[in-house]
Amino acid sequence: MLNGYNNRITSFNGGIYDDDTVRACVDAIARHFAKMKPTHKLKNVEQSSNLNKLLSLRPNTEMSSYDFLYKICTNLYIENNAYIYIRRDSFGNIIGLYPVLYNQAELIEDRLGNFYLRFNFSGSQTITESIENIIVLRKHFYKNDFYGESNHQTLNPVINLLYTINQGIIQAVKTSGLIRGILKLVGMLQGDDKTELKKQFEEDYLSAQNSGGIAVTDDRSTYIPIESKPILVDDKNTALAKDKVYTYFGVSEGIVKGKYTEDEWQSFYESVLEPLAISFSQEFTAKIFTQREIDFGNTVVFIADRLSYMNTKSKIDMIVAVKELGVLNKGQLAEILNLSPPPDAEEYLQSLNYINSKIANQYQLNNGKEGEKVDGE
């Protein structure tokens, strides 16, 4: 590799995932992508194979398909690198797909030019596997020949800013209930006496028990309050900082909060979910099947039901527009409207006002001949 000098990568250890804005963004992407259906297809026809059952139901013994996709997507967005181990039986059949959460990943090349990935885990455990048995997914793929770029340098400044804003709000709440001021003592007192009076004043009036926020002094002392006005970052600048995180992950506030419009969802799907689906499909297909199986038309695709995010009016408008074309059966129409399928769910309805373009000329000529025959009579 041209940049082979950097052949290892270390896990981010969840640093950015501890920030609530980052976690909300990654969660929004992961939970929506996890609703996709990974499907084994042969020449674009879904197969009832063991692989299809494994992909769509339970990729491994510990995870459902939803959990599996959620975990991979989260790992990908936090680390910008995600790995899935393909476990096969003695006959080469896939019996499990396992996300690999590592402390360090190292790319190794043997003398024959074969590549391996060595994973180091907590507890000093190490596993080395052929790259052919590892599904590799990457984001921000730039300088390194194999690994995606880290989020450290890009996200840390804005995360530190958000952390400072949150800490400032917490401190403002704390200080708003405190008494601040100067205790002026009358007369000449020794240092120990001053300290004792100050300590007594703090215990009486600056503790949590002084919920009233009032201090009482006698002739020996005078309390001069100091007005404290914590300076907070306004909502506009706070929103600007959060928007930087939204932009980095390609989501909007509406997507994160679940208050998106159809247009926002369409944009989110096309800019975030669809690229992920294409990336996953290509890598899963390349690593799961042999070249011969791929040549025969075997693929793994990730299917999303985009129609489920339409409002009722848009669904009805879409149905009215296509129902006479015979592209949807009754069961599919019912599913779009979240209704139970009818007994004749597989039946297609089509208008007789349409004709196959390949036989349009023949149909027109036949009508013309019939018309002549009628006139001759």
Image (cartoon, grey):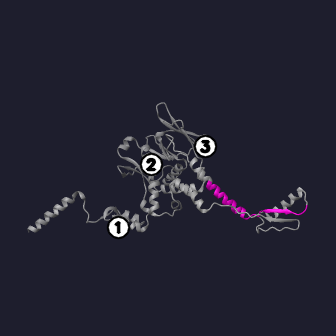
The one nearer the camera, 146 or 164, is 164
Q: Relative to 72, is 264 above or below? A: below
Res. 150 visible in picture: yes
| 96 vs 161, nearest the viewer | 161
**Residue 289: quarter of image:** top left
What range of the chain is rendered magenta?
161-187
Residue 16 in the image, given as x and y percentages of width and height:
59, 51
Direction from residue 339 to residue 163 in the image, left or right:
right
Spatial distance from mark 1 to mark 3, Cα to Cα? 57 Å
Classed neighbour count for the residue bearing mark 1: other residues with Cα under 10 Å, few (<14), some (14–19), many (≥20): few
What residue does disc 2 label?
279
Check disc 1 and report the residue beneath it: 320
Query: Quick check: is 171 in the magenta stretch?
Result: yes
Q: Is residue 214 magenta?
A: no
Viewer-proximal residue, 2 or 232? 232
| Amino acid under disc 1 | Val
Q: Where in the figure is residue 349, as x and y percent of width and height?
A: 31, 65
Residue at the limit of the structure toward the left, as seen here = 376
User: Can you tell which of label 3 and label 2 is closer to the viewer?
Assistant: 2
**Which is nearer the N-term, disc 2 or disc 1?**
2
Separation of marks 3 and 2 at Cα, in angstroms = 29 Å
The numbered disc on residue 148 is none
**Which amino acid, by three-letter code, is at mark 2?**
Ser
The kind of residue tagged 3 is Ser
Q: CA distance from mark 2 to mark 1?
A: 34 Å
Q: Position of residue 211 (x, y in %)?
A: 76, 67
Q: Quadrant of residue 105?
A: top right
- Residue 122's disc number: 3
Query: Could you tell which of marks 3 and 2 lies nearer the N-terminus?
Result: 3
Q: Quadrant of the C terminus?
A: bottom left
Residue drawn at point x = 36 percent, y = 65 percent: 319
The residue sitting at 11% across, 65% down in the picture is 372
